[in-house]
Image (cartoon, rainbow, N blue to C red):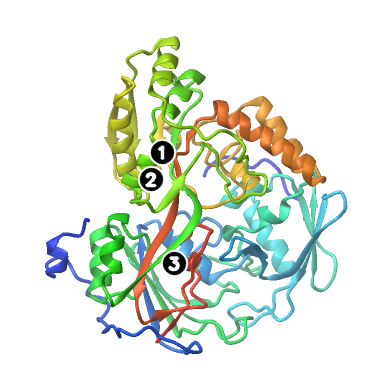
Amino acid sequence: MSFDKRISRRNFLVGSAVLAGTAPLLSACGGRSSAVAAPTGAPRRGGTLRVGITGGGASDTLDPHIPATSPDIARVRNLYEPLLYRDHDYRLEMLVAESLTPSPDARTWTATLREGVRFHDGRPVTPADVIATFRRIMDPDDPKSGAASLTMLGEVVASGDRRVEFRLTEPSTVFDDYLAQYSLGIVPADFSVDRPIGTGPFRTQDFTPGLQSTFVRNEHYWRPGQPYLDELVLINFAEDDARINALLSSQVDAIDQVPVALVEVLRSDERLRVLSAQTGTWLPFTMRVDRPPFDDVRVRQALRLVVDREQMINQVLSGQGRIGNDLYGPFDPAYASELPQRRQDIAEARRLLTEAGHPNLDVELVTAPIQAGAVEAAQVFQQQAKAAGVNVRLRRLDTTAFWENYLSWDFAQSFWYTRNYLPQVASGSLPQSPYNETHWSDPEFLGLVRRADRTVDRAEREDLLKRAQRIEYERGGNIIWGFMNQVDAHQVYVAGLLPDRTGLPLSGYSFREAWLG
């Protein structure tokens, strides 16, 4: 199978009302009394886990290759599996494949499929299924979200009963990282979204977009004994207070994205447990480098200097995070940690703005509750900018309006989960990237990352990546003020949920290890 490369761009405060029980309660699920003692011993089989997930809507989907919202991602993580993925410690872990090895020149990668992996309907996974999966992802007329990272993929061919070769048009030394994405789940050759079959620990029983999804144990799952649950129910919540209320009233067993102001409140409740994980998740301010005034690098540098990063961590995240340095990929071995930590410098920010002809800069910042802390970060930034004579006008939208137009905003926000450097570049920092929010297209930068992806020698590759990061550090369009801890919560009787560095909530939205005491 050959691929056409013409991939087009496309895609708390809860308050007394909650504690008094006057906020709306879920009517779809009955409550469950909380046992105060946490479960111990070996995992138990059986039961239903009800999980409250942030966001979603009428466009919710079971498509494995275009997850966009948090509920979409949670469904994908439990219904489907890619060839490999990142484990809870952010290490590569083989899933549908038992091995993935490159040729010496990194132009051919050979995947050996794990023996005994079956789809939900009992059919074994074959090389033909893998080929069909990537044909679907790379369809030039309808490219899926993972296609942007795979532009070097020339063809996928079977080379044995359980072997598949990924033949590239140019070397890629981190092709395994590109394949380790939740949006690249393997599906059967005759896959249809109307019949969502994968290899994940759960299979679909019922799905109502914007409301609720119900899944049951996949009896053909390849990991012995897992999943432990009989049933998994994912429930959409648009508002924080409703989600928190559902947890407090035992209408759900776990929730994602706890508002940071509530962490200590929930920790003080003996019925609950807070799950916190250090991640590489970032919540940047994005400046379009092709639009005034942000097309002047001095303006971009000045706005980075008005940020008090420690204050951001303390006020926006209640200390649940660590400061950033306008660079992403903090877990990448090549992360440029040697660059000086950028700190607030109001005098230098004023000097740069005056030099750029904007001594009294006035800008609009588009914000929306796209992630916990987003609107709060915009409000803190607005106050910090005043010290440099910058008037930041906040334009607050709902999430639907924000995402419909977010690639067009001159100055806005975004959020990204943990990725290593080159996969993140592919997703958001190349002219052809599907989510290039800053419209970044620096020729020197592009040359360095292209060379790095082709360079087999590790030391030489890391040197190229550090040089590329210095360019973004000096003249990029992202203000990356910090990395957020992922904070979730669950009832004390829920076991098997682990801190996860990928940035995805609740054990990386993987519930195969979860069980009920």
Image-quadrant location for residue 166: bottom right
Q: In the image, is residue 445 above or below residue 71?
A: above
Position of 396 with respect to 121 (left or right) is left
How far apart marks 3 and 2 lie (CA) works out to 22 Å
Q: Which residue is mark 3?
A: 506
Q: Which numbered disc flags the more N-terminal residue, 3 or 2?
A: 2
Q: Along the line of sight, which residue is nearer the eye, 77 or 260?
A: 260
Do callouts 2 and 1 mark residues in contact (Cβ within 8 Å)?
yes
Mark 1 vs mark 3, foreground winner is: 1
Position in image of residue 19 (x %, y %): 15, 68
User: Residue at 33% of width from left, 51% of height from top?
Assistant: 318
Residue type beneath disc 1: Arg
Residue 195 appears in the rendering: no
Q: How many marks?
A: 3
Position of 285 with respect to 424 (left or right) is left
Q: Quadrant of the C terminus?
A: bottom left
Q: Residues within 10 Å of mark 2 (few under 14, many from 20)?
A: many
Image-quadrant location for residue 252: bottom left
How far apart marks 2 and 1 lie (CA) works out to 6 Å
Q: Which of the numbered marks, if any, corresponds to residue 313? A: 2
Position in image of residue 486 (x %, y %): 43, 58
Position in image of residue 215 (x %, y %): 45, 77
Q: Secondary structure at mark 2?
A: helix
Q: Which residue is mark 1?
A: 309
User: Residue at 40% of width from left, 11% of height from top?
Assistant: 354
Q: In the image, is residue 150 above or below residue 181?
A: above
How far apart marks 1 and 3 lie (CA) works out to 27 Å
Q: Which numbered disc flags the more N-terminal residue, 1 or 3?
A: 1
Q: Which of the numbered marks, if any, corresponds to residue 324? A: none
Position of 432 with respect to 14 (left or right) is right
